[in-house]
Image (spheres, rainbow, N blue to C red):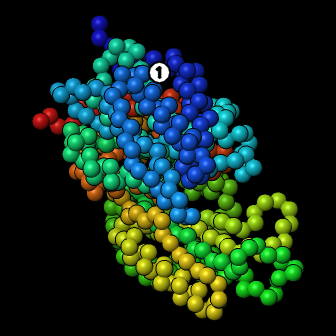
Amino acid sequence: MTSSIQDVFTHIENNQQLFVKRLAEWVSVRSVSSQPELRGEVLRMVQMTAQHIERLGGAVEMVDIGTETLADGSKLALPPVILAEIGRDPAKKTVCVYGHLDVQPAQLEDGWDSDPFTLTHRNGKLYGRGATDDKGPVLSWLNCIESFQAVSKALPVNVKLCLEGMEESGSIGLGELIAERGKSFFGNVDCVCISDSYWLGTQTPCLTFGLRGLCYFEIEVQCAQRDLHSGVYGGSVHEAMTDLTQILASLVDSSGRILVPGIYKSVKPLSEMEAQLCANVDFSPEEYRLEIGATTLQQHTKEDILNHRWHLPSLSIHGIEGAFSELGQKTVIPSRVVGKFSIRTVPNMEPDEVERQVKDYVAQTFSELRSPNRFRITMPVGSQAWVADSTHPNYTAGRNAMRRVFGVEPNLIRDGCSIPVTLDFARHTALNVLLLSLGACDDGAHSQNEKFNLSNYMNGMKVMASYLEELSLVLPKE
Ligand SMILES: Cn1cncc1C[C@H](N)C(=O)O
Ligand code: BAL
Ligand SMILES: [Zn+2]
Ligand SMILES: [Zn+2]
């Protein structure tokens, strides 16, 4: 008797402990791509994943994508990209699953309740850096495939995997690889699925069809050759921090309006359909405010909040490299500081135009300070927004899978975060990309106490299994 999808579901349910143990092992790897000293850990995470795929019978290629040049001019090897395939049946359709194995930085002192790299199960939530972004979802794909194999049910479609270790650093090198393999590895792919996004709330599942882009800026100011005693030298030096804080303060006002001249001129006007979407989705401004612990939000209606998160640019100031930020009272004038901020871009904004507008404005602001200090601004990462065709059968398969597992109609939403590879697929292939969102809105990706609900982890694997089966049914036959 052939096994059914229900047998796959049952296997998933029966192996919860094993799947949680595996996630703990993945979370324990400090694969932080933005910290050069942890590059070896990113490599280890990629190698661990490749071996896991091979144990599933997958054919794995570890593609060398070269090196990156660090701020000091030194070169650092980029982690290889995994291109793998499980199933090569020419009679079946093929889906490519993308995910990332690197994570954002984290340390207990940031305010975590437990070690960020020790998966901690509390009240049905699995706490750890990367649990939801994106190790949990990537591991879910592998557990899902294993569950088909365990009940001797053939995969309904062939599965290819494209897994990288630099997404949290802008996916350096991945775009070139997709361009190079667009007709070979990706040539027989019918659609793409990415699970690296979150629901609008904690109950209603979502499919995501649009993201904002990201332009990341670094402003360097230097006032001396070494840090200086603020008592001995204060009052006689044009301090770098004074220049930098005035520049940062000139970028955005307290209402969140970006002050860079012309930054809004290319923003696409809100369409009636987009306004309707904001009105129709299941989203509670009050739950959102409480969940993030904000006293008040900058907007007050559901429509206005979502419009600002999805369809309008935002500017966030992230930090100052070289500035003192430890406990205690260090009384030093930092000789060199680097201010870091980013602009989330939306449709019709072009990164090149944003770069020009920001650099012109910041240079003008700096010149008005009449400062003798050394000044430099760079934009290491720049990407546009991304919007998919949500009428594609790929979205039908995702919708059917969500409905089957959760018993409710998923919401179709956009998100304000950025996943560079979506643009690479749009630029170099004609493939439809579905964001099969598995995380809940309160997962805290990039934040302290990032978590992945055990129920989202387990149900997510069932959604993936069902999605693979739905794809085999809805993708048009040749
Ligand atoms: C750093 N970066 C550049 N593009 C995307 C990222 C990281 C992450 N996906 C974000 O939305 O913030
Ligand atoms: N998870 C959404 C894109 C990123 O932050 O990795
Ligand atoms: Zn992610
Ligand atoms: Zn992330």
Asked if the beta carbon under badge 1 is closer than 8 A to the nearest atom of ligand 3, the reply is: no
Q: Which amino acid does label 1 sit on?
A: Ile
In this view, which residue lies farthest toward the left? Answer: 478
Residue nearest the observer in this picture, 404 or 66: 66
Horizontally, residue 448 falls left or right of residue 312, namely: right
Q: Position of residue 41 (x, y in %)?
A: 57, 40
Would residue 464 be visible to someone looking at this image?
Answer: yes
Q: At 48% across and 65% down in the image, what residue appears?
A: 380
Task: Say if 221 sits above or below 282 in the image.
Answer: below
Question: Where's residue 458, x and y in %?
Answer: 50, 28
Question: What residue lies at 33% left-to-right and 65% top-to-bottom?
Answer: 272
Dot 1 alpha-carbon crowd within 10 angstroms: few under 14, some 14 to 19, many 20 or more: many
Q: SS class of the residue under badge 1?
A: helix
**Horizontal and vertical percent for residue 249?**
63, 79
Q: Name the residue under label 1.
A: 12
Q: Position of residue 339 (x, y in %)?
A: 62, 71
Is 369 on the left-hand or right-hand side of 437? right
Quadrant housing the C terminus: top left
**Residue 456 visible in the picture:** no
Q: Nearer the viewer, residue 20 or 322?
A: 322
Viewer-side residue, 363 vs 256: 363
Please count the marks in the image. 1
Q: In which quarter of the image is residue 149?
A: top left
In the image, taking residue 81 as reference, residue 315 lies left or right, namely right
**The N terminus - image quarter:** top left
Instruction: Tell me: residue 240, above or below residue 134.
Output: below
Q: Farthest residue toward the top?
A: 1
Residue 262 quadrant = bottom left
Q: Which residue is depicted at the point 51% across and 52% down? A: 76
Residue at left offset 79%, top offset 88%: 236
